[in-house]
Amino acid sequence: MSKALEGVRILDFGHVQAGPTATQLLAWMGADVIKIEMPGRGDITRGQLQDVKGADSLYFTMLNSNKRSITVNLKAPGGRRIIEDLVKRCDVILENFGPGVLDRQGFTWERFQELNPRVIYASIKGFGPGPYADCKAYENVAQCMGGSASTTGWEDGPPTVTGAQIGDSGTGVHTIAGILAALFQRERTGRGQRVEVAMTDAVLNLCRVKMRDQQRLQHGPLPEYPNKEFGDAVPRAGNASGGGQPGAALRCAPGGPNDWVYVIIQPPSWEPLMRLCGREELIDDPGYATPQARLPKIPECFSIIEKWTMTKTKFEVMQALNEVDVPCGPILSMKDIYEDKSLYERGYLVELDHPTRGRYVQVGSPINLSDSPVEVKRSPLLGEHTDEILGWLGYSKDEIVKLRDEKAI
Ligand SMILES: CC(C)(COP(=O)(O)OP(=O)(O)OC[C@H]1O[C@@H](n2cnc3c(N)ncnc32)[C@H](O)[C@@H]1OP(=O)(O)O)[C@@H](O)C(=O)NCCC(=O)NCCS
């Protein structure tokens, strides 16, 4: 069966996480992703957090499935010639280097357009134009400056970063939307275009409900927040729900670190919840019966429910609540998820063989297209496809040997 992006070729300068997330998803949708890597070292994540000596790290394998790897020295004339040859034959270029890295090698947007007017050039940076444009950024920098860290955590605790990689992977996913839109527009105009995404912008996009609350704060305290006092900025609100329906994490049996369940009280949920908790008298009590009456008593309402959840495991709570249509989510540890057979059965967790590290588990594609099934393949070894790609570009065996001698590949 053909793939959605079959025939789309991507020149991938992505490294670490933000860029590789984007190109991995594009590869799963069928694009041919050619990953450019520094000779001898490759993407820095190959060697970071290594668990198997001498083998590519899981950091790297998790983010680079279904790609081809070619080593090219950007700083050697022969290497730059290879890049130019590739630009002419690719549909999309993606990079997430520090500001100015490609420009310093003569690879500006103008140069790419000269080489290939149809090429789409996607760049990920920490910041958009403005005072921070020249600054480098990592995940947590973006979380801190995009509004996430100041609004995550507990009122009396420090700003907190989230384990979800919203700055890196979140930005990668935003970038894909830009690339696909540009490919679609190119169908009509015949021209490529520049796609630029800043990590801090992507994080703020994901935190836009907190910007909503910043403006609501001008009209008084935020009643759905558990906080007693409000300053002039949106406070950290613990596990309170970010939406219009109150929610809280409640303890379950037997009391381990992840024996918790997140419960949401939609208006119709009050009655079944109170029945399960054996508190039928509160169903019609005017002090509790409506969302407005409950709003000032949210902690008390959840502590009533918690008395019941503490008598059950998180999965028993989930079953009981779903039977009465109450939305909830047991807190799943990474171990719970790693051992969940149903995820393997439906191909979202995939076991792969790797020539140097052996078997490992890969998170597959969260996007499923009915006419473009995803086949997850292991990440490439460093330079595994160098000769193959150079041969395809028309370089002879002797020329390849010479390029190697010159340290251009
Ligand atoms: C992530 C980041 C902070 C890493 O910084 P860094 O390790 O100093 O790497 P940079 O991207 O700035 O620079 C890479 C250097 O390696 C060189 N390099 C990279 N690939 C190369 C190759 N194939 N051949 C030769 N040199 C290469 C570059 O030319 C550059 O050298 P220069 O500084 O002399 O010009 C930075 O890339 C960045 O801010 N990226 C944008 C935001 C981002 O994506 N951050 C999150 C990453 S998950």
Image (cartoon, helix red, strand yellow):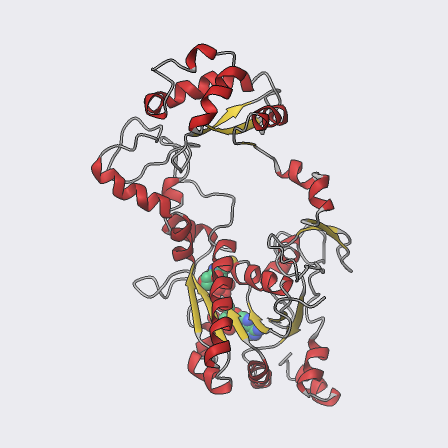
Please state the horizontal and vertical placement of residue 2, each as a whole percent of the image: 69, 68
Residue at the (71%, 73%) spot, across then down: 385
Residue at the (69%, 44%) spot, across then down: 343
Q: Quadrant of residue 110?
A: bottom left
| Residue 357 in the figure: left or right of residue 60 | right
Q: Quadrant of residue 255?
A: top right
Residue at the (48%, 12%) spot, across then down: 279
As displayed, is residue 356 above or below residue 251? Answer: below
Residue toward you, 406 or 87: 87
Please state the horizontal and vertical placement of residue 127, each as a whole percent of the image: 38, 61
Please state the horizontal and vertical placement of residue 37, each as a whole percent of the image: 61, 70
Please state the horizontal and vertical placement of residue 186, each as a whole percent of the image: 49, 76
Residue toward you, 44 or 314: 314
Residue at the (35%, 20%) spot, across then down: 297
From where the camera sits, is residue 97 visible? no
Residue toward you, 272 or 347: 272
From where the camera sits, is residue 401 visible? yes
Number of numbered discs visible in the structure rendering? 0
As displayed, is residue 242 above or below residue 173? Answer: above
Q: Quadrant of residue 357?
A: bottom right
| Residue that lies at the very extreme toward the top in this rendered image | 281
The quarter of the picture where the N terminus appears is bottom right
As displayed, is residue 8 above or below residue 257? Answer: below
As displayed, is residue 151 above or below residue 381? Answer: above
| Residue 3 in the figure: left or right of residue 133 | right
| Residue 80 in the figure: left or right of residue 371 | left
